[in-house]
């Protein structure tokens, strides 16, 4: 077992912390409104869901979901639970349909962002109007889809680069 395969969950958790820091600090500093802020961690969850199911991707998805909730204002286990649900739904879709292409994965991440934003908006304590929640969810879903494409292409290129060293890098 290589070192890369052993510490895979830690690498993805650190990447989730980095992407969450970008979401929180960089996008508002650039003047991007909150309606257009993407959920970059869904790209990591989508990539992990497209890998073959095993204990390392599951542990990495758990680390990503917990790390993504550290910077967010939603309390409790709602957001990590939704992200893990998205991971399990994506891994199930990976077993049934062709999701090895970047565009279906990006579409899945966008639809997941739409679902997650609506669910977090509905479950929020001071409930915003449903129309506002749907508009924000559509903006987040669109930008998540657009930002997921380069992240997934980078992760796929990285996976292909390390594939000859160890054919079982991500799977258990």
Image (cartoon, rainbow, N blue to C red):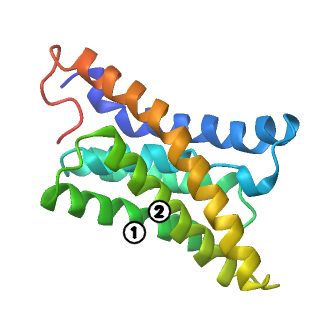
- At which x and y percent is residue 47? 35, 43
Query: Quick check: 91 left or right of 84?
Result: left
Query: Quick check: 161 left or right of 166?
Result: right
Query: Quick check: 57 left or right of 109?
Result: left
- At which x and y percent is residue 23? 70, 43
Foreground mark, 2 or 1, reads 2
Kindly identify the residue that appears in the image at 76 percent across and 75 percent down.
Answer: 132
**Residue at mark 1:** 85
- Callout 1 crowding tier (Cα within 10 Å): few <14, some 14–19, many ≥20: few
Q: Secondary structure at mark 2?
A: helix
Vertical comparison of 87 with 85: above or below: above
- At which x and y percent is residue 57? 30, 46
Residue 12's image quarter? top left
Viewport quadrant of the N terminus: top left
Residue 170's image quarter? top left
**Residue at mark 2:** 112
Residue 163's image quarter? top left
Kindly identify the residue that appears in the image at 36 percent across and 50 percent down.
Answer: 59
Vertical comparison of 58 with 7: above or below: below
Vertical comparison of 57 with 149: above or below: below
Q: Secondary structure at mark 1?
A: helix
- Callout 2 crowding tier (Cα within 10 Å): few <14, some 14–19, many ≥20: many
């Amino acid at each position: 077992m290589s070192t890369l395969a052993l510490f895979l969950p830690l690498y993805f958790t650190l990447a989730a912390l980095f992407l969450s820091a970008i979401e929180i600090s960089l996008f508002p500093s650039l003047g991007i409104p909150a309606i257009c802020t993407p959920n970059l961690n869904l790209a990591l969850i989508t990539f992990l869901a497209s890998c073959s199911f095993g204990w390392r991707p599951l542990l990495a998805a758990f680390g990503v979901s917990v790390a993504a909730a550290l910077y967010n204002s939603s309390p409790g286990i709602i957001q990590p639970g939704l992200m893990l649900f998205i991971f399990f739904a994506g891994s199930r879709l990976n077993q049934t349909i062709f999701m090895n292409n970047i565009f279906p994965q990006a579409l899945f991440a966008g639809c997941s962002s739409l679902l997650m934003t609506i669910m977090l908006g509905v479950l929020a304590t001071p409930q915003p109007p449903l129309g506002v929640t749907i508009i924000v969810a559509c903006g987040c879903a669109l930008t998540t889809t657009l930002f997921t494409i380069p992240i997934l292409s980078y992760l796929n290129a990285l996976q292909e680069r390390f594939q000859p060293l160890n054919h079982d890098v991500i799977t258990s």
